[in-house]
Image: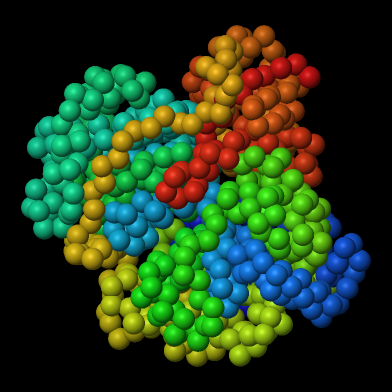
Amino acid sequence: MSRVHTSCAYCGVGCGITVDDAKTLAGDTEHPANGGALCVKGGSLMETLAFPNRLLYPRLHGQQVSWDTALDEMAAQFGRIIAETGPESVAFYVSGQLLTEDYYIANKLMKGFIGAANIDTNSRLCMSSAVMAHSRAFGEDVVPGCYDDLEITDLLVITGANTAWTHPVIFRRIQQARARRPEMKMVVIDPRKTMTAEQADLHLALRPGSDVWLFNGLSRYLLDHDLIDNAYIEEHVNGFSELHAQLMTPDYELANVAQKCGLSVSELQTFYRWFGENEKAVTLFCQGINQSNQGTDKGNALINTHLLTGRVGKPGASPFSMTGQPNAMGGREVGGLATQLASHMTFSDENCDRVARFWNAPNIARKPGLKAVDMFEAVRSGKIRALWVVATNPAVSLPDSVMVREALAKCEFLVVSEMTPKTDTAQFADLLLPAAGWGERGGTVTNSERCITRQRAFTNAPGEAKPDWWAMAELGKRLGFADAFNYNDTVDIFREHAALSGFENSSRQFDISALATLTDDEYEQFTPRQWPLPAGKNAASQRLFGDGCFSTPNGKANLLTVVPQEPVLKRKAERQEGSWLLNTGRLRDQWHTMTRTGHLPRLMETEPLPKVYVNQHTLQASGFSEGALIRINSLQGSVMTLLGRDDGLRDGEAFMPMHWSDDFSSCSGVNRLVAPVVDAVSGQPQFKQTEVMAEAV
Ligand code: SF4
């Protein structure tokens, strides 16, 4: 029996999957990420193949049309608007669900040929703060470590992540490593006592938003106790004297840091001592750090502690950012974010000229485009007149979703590529394009440890559904760029992407030019590999920067002096009596806005209805009973939900999952409540802190 090797469609762990002739799905025992293991979501992927309400044909203003008619109309509308008000009046909003080849074409079309950088991705919502923290510290957006480090470390610090629920296969690897080596310690930093925190040796339930205090306090402790690596700092690090001057003040004495973080001095001392003592320490971070008004600074504050101790890119010792989506990393590589050009290049004149030469591009963009939140505000105000949304549901997933719906409704020409016409965003489309989905399309993805894996088709797409790269290339041809978008298949795109990564590249780690000469057959047979993979060089790719040489102009990493800021709470005046501080996040069994997972009874049964959770004390103080139907309001909007109890929450704090949409439960999408507050550096929204009031329905 033959088996197709592919990968999971859901999260940044990037588990390998096999599908046999009988369409039986299993974990891929040969894949380095999962070694055959799958979580409940990945294990149920096959059951989602036939999900209801597939979009089978293009629809223009609700009427079925041919692909030719659809694409001609799209080119006419985009072309007209570009001619009337310039390239910055059109935009693409894409997704970490795209395969790298899709992403590459979207980026090339917008930044090289249309001539603006208004292409952003929903990855802006999950890890753009980590991208900027890496770039500021290392000179390039590089995750220095690998999954093995999570197993061989002596101290695993998990901060702002409920790994047991959001990256279950990685958490299983951690559990197994701890069973083999019980001396391996685990610290979990999270205001909520999550499933992950329950298994920690030490759980620090810090005050929401106080992470910079915590990590700056750790740096101060390392300085005070002579636990830094002076030789490493001398040779490989910039900015030590500035950081030293900032931290050697009374602000960062232990008692003050403990008070700022809402923790006891002894809790802090234990964490700090463990970090100081254990040369092999990994800090895994995710949305609790990134989704903040100060997410980039938080990332840099924690990276500082690794630079001070020389623990970057060494076995069992690194900062480690987990990505949320299956191909958020691939999107970063090709320039899927409005703030990157391509192949990890910034918008310097030299880089723009280089990419223009490589693409033979007539209209290279020379400055970053609008980030997600700003992009939708520009749609609302009419500055952006045509928008193409691909494989994502911003009407639910962006903050201030009421404003986003207003923007979508006002958009002069809105195109949505989707597998179903039933998403909240698709309801607003002028033109709906049917997209091939997981199992029906082929290409590559890159997971959180920089491992590139082939996704492969094993079944035909229904109706006239097509891969996204094809629709993008067809638009490029119709806009007058036929030569630049003349691809037969994804292998052509991948070879070009690989060649660009090595083109005049003497300083960037992201280089996969060894793959630029893959034959069609080699691409078909491609087995998972980590980058970098530079042509003609022997790259040690499992870890990066272990030699202390970074991608900055002087080759040294940067310590950042970051000043703690409070979360930005949109409120009328002072905090209202009885208000809750609302945190949002994921459920174990659901994915994004439930467009796939919401149709499976066995995934729905653990949490069939939207709920907001508070602890027993807060529940009693609220006057509502557990299970009551309530309305919760913020300055931004209101939602209706059931009230649940979770004693892992701190007093006065609440948690609500991010998944619910109007398609599943009217007016329950939590982002109706969340204000469009973003990190000043990355533009990533602050999803984790919103002040809300509960009232009876
Ligand atoms: Fe898929 Fe992530 Fe689960 Fe692996 S851990 S099976 S990649 S959802």
Q: Residue at x 15, y 58 (%)?
A: 236
The one nearer the camera, 191 or 14, is: 191
The one nearer the camera, 194 or 554, is: 554
Q: Position of residue 478 (x, y in %)?
A: 71, 82
In the rendered view, tell whether residue 658 sits above or below residue 464.
above
The answer to whether one can see residue 628 in this image is no
Q: Residue at x 83, y 70 (%)?
A: 58
Q: Which residue is drawn at 63% across and 49% down?
A: 377
Q: In which quarter of the image is the C terminus?
A: top right
> Is residue 56 rendered to the left or right of residue 145?
right
In the rendered view, tell whether residue 131 sits above or below residue 621.
below
Q: Position of residue 60 (x, y in %)?
A: 86, 67
Asked which quadrant contains residue 254, the reply is: top left
In the rendered view, tell whether residue 512 sits above or below residue 605.
below
Asked which quadrant contains residue 637, the reply is: top right
State the residue lying farthest toward the right: 63
The one nearer the camera, 554 or 168, is: 554
The answer to whether one can see residue 355 in this image is yes
> Is residue 122 rendered to the left or right of residue 314?
right
Q: Position of residue 442 (x, y in %)?
A: 62, 75
Q: Quadrant of the N terminus?
A: bottom right
> Is residue 355 rendered to the left or right of residue 369?
left
Q: Position of residue 153 (x, y in %)?
A: 28, 48
Q: How many marks?
A: 0
Q: Which residue is drawn at 42% across and 75% down?
A: 352
In the rendered view, tell whether residue 354 sits above or below residue 285.
below
Give the colour scheme shown.
Answer: rainbow
